[in-house]
Image (cartoon, grey):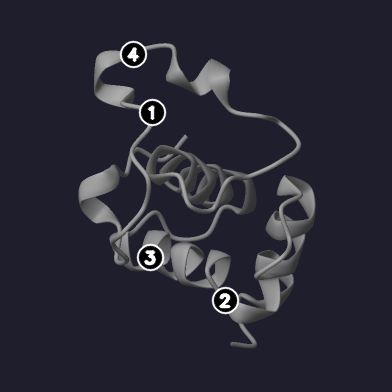
Amino acid sequence: MANFTTEDLAFTGYSQTVDATNNPKYIEIFNPIYVDKTEECEVVHFCNQFLEKYKVPQTKSSFQKVESFLQHSILEHQIYREELLDWIASNWIKL
């Protein structure tokens, strides 16, 4: 999986309830079905997961593009991980 961190996020104001730096098994706590787009560590995990799954360039720019899509107004009420991944992949070139 890509290895970008909270330092690479473009947006601010995320909740920091989960501290991945103090919990090496933090990946295990992520819900495989839903994404909490307000939680900093979940956003980082989701963006890294997208970069790995869809084999897009492993760059900070791509990481931030995924983050930007995740926060897109069209996806405001979407929380299902697979649907988010699919929508972002489908719109990667378009938007």
What amino acid is labelled 2 in the image? Answer: His
Q: Secondary structure at mark 2?
A: loop
Residue pointed to by mark 2: 72
Residue pointed to by mark 3: 64
Question: How many angstroms separate mark 3 from mark 1 (CA)?
Answer: 20 Å
Say if mark 4 contacts mark 1, CB within 8 Å: yes
What amino acid is labelled 4 in the image? Answer: Asn
Sequence-wise first label, 2 or 4: 4
Question: How many angstroms separate mark 4 from mark 3 (CA)?
Answer: 24 Å
Question: How many angstroms separate mark 2 from mark 4 (CA)?
Answer: 29 Å
Q: Is residue 59 above or below residue 71?
A: above
Identity of the residue drawn at 71% across and 47% down: 81
Residue pointed to by mark 1: 18
Question: How many angstroms separate mark 4 from mark 1 (CA)?
Answer: 8 Å
Would you say 49 lies left or right of 39 here?
right
Nearer the observer, disc 4 or disc 3? 4
Identity of the residue drawn at 71% across and 31% down: 32
Residue pointed to by mark 4: 23
Say if mark 3 contacts mark 1, CB within 8 Å: no
From the top left corner, tell me how far across and down residue 3 is, in percent.
34, 38
Local packing at callout 3 (Cα closer than 10 Å; few below 14, some 14-19, many 20+) is some
